[in-house]
Image (cartoon, grey):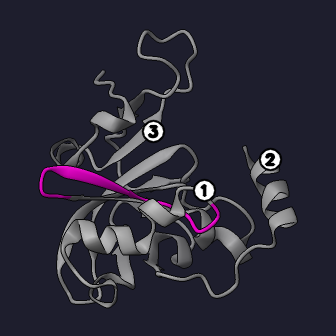
Amino acid sequence: MEVRLPSKIGPKALSQHPVWEFLNDDGHPAGDTAMRPITKLPVRGFAGRLFGTSVTLADGSRFPAAISDLGFGPKKYRHHFRSLNVFAKGRRFHLAHYFQFWYETQGPDALAAFLGKKRDQVFPISYDISHLAIGPHDVIRGVFEAAISNPIPQDKLMTLLVRGR
């Protein structure tokens, strides 16, 4: 069985195996954050899984990407927790969430700069993993916005994060 750390799962690995899941095995030599590919598609369930796909930017350009943390949290806030990694120029860019302290250096403006584009050329970013997963429409298809219109109140955010992990 092929096993990789998330940082070693790039466009090539995702083209061969577009869905990966965490081993969650403390005894594995690669550690509990190692991942294995899932070969039977489409999958049901999103927890602990990474999905390789192409995303479409506002200007219509497409880039390989990895999306994870889908379906986490209550329906009202699910889209706040999705994670996005975009691959370009032989590198990976992990887009920070608005509530993470590195948002200023890894947020929407930084992604636009990484891609050599203006923010409005990049956002919104759309994705569709309906060929990889079965689940709620708003989870398998979605949009990453540059700004969240209804941010989670800080006290509720902490409760969701602690309860969800």
Secondary structure under tag 1 reads: loop
Mark 2 → mark 3, Cα distance in angstroms: 21 Å
Task: Indicate the amino acid at tag 1.
Answer: Phe
Determine which quarter of the picture holds residue 120. bottom left
Residue 29, given in percent of the width and then of the height, sits at 43, 9
Q: Is residue 98 left or right of residue 36?
A: right
Magenta-colored stretch includes residue 89: yes
Residue corresponding to mark 2: 162
Residue 40, given in percent of the width and then of the height, sits at 35, 44
Q: Nearer the viewer, mark 1 or mark 3?
A: 1
Would you call the spot at circle 1 few (<14 residues within 10 Å), some (14-19), or many (20 or more)?
Answer: few
Q: Which residue ends up furthest to the front in the rendered image? A: 104
Determine which quarter of the picture holds residue 55. bottom left
Q: Nearer the viewer, residue 76 or 92?
A: 92
Ranked by sequence position, the earlier of labels 1 and 3 is 3
Task: Indicate the amino acid at tag 3.
Answer: Glu
Residue corresponding to mark 3: 21
Task: Indicate the amino acid at tag 2.
Answer: Val
Determine which quarter of the picture holds residue 13. top left
What residue sits 28% from the left and 24% below the top? 2
Residue corresponding to mark 1: 101
What residue sits 54% from the left and 83% below the top? 147
Q: Where the N terminus falls, by quadrant?
A: top left
What residue sits 81% from the left and 66% below the top? 154
Which stretch did the figure color magenta?
88-99
Secondary structure under tag 2 reads: helix
Q: Report the label total.
A: 3
Secondary structure under tag 3 reads: strand
Mark 2 → mark 1, Cα distance in angstroms: 17 Å
Q: Nearer the viewer, residue 124 or 15?
A: 124
Q: Nearer the viewer, residue 43 or 49?
A: 49
Residue 160, given in percent of the width and then of the height, sits at 79, 57
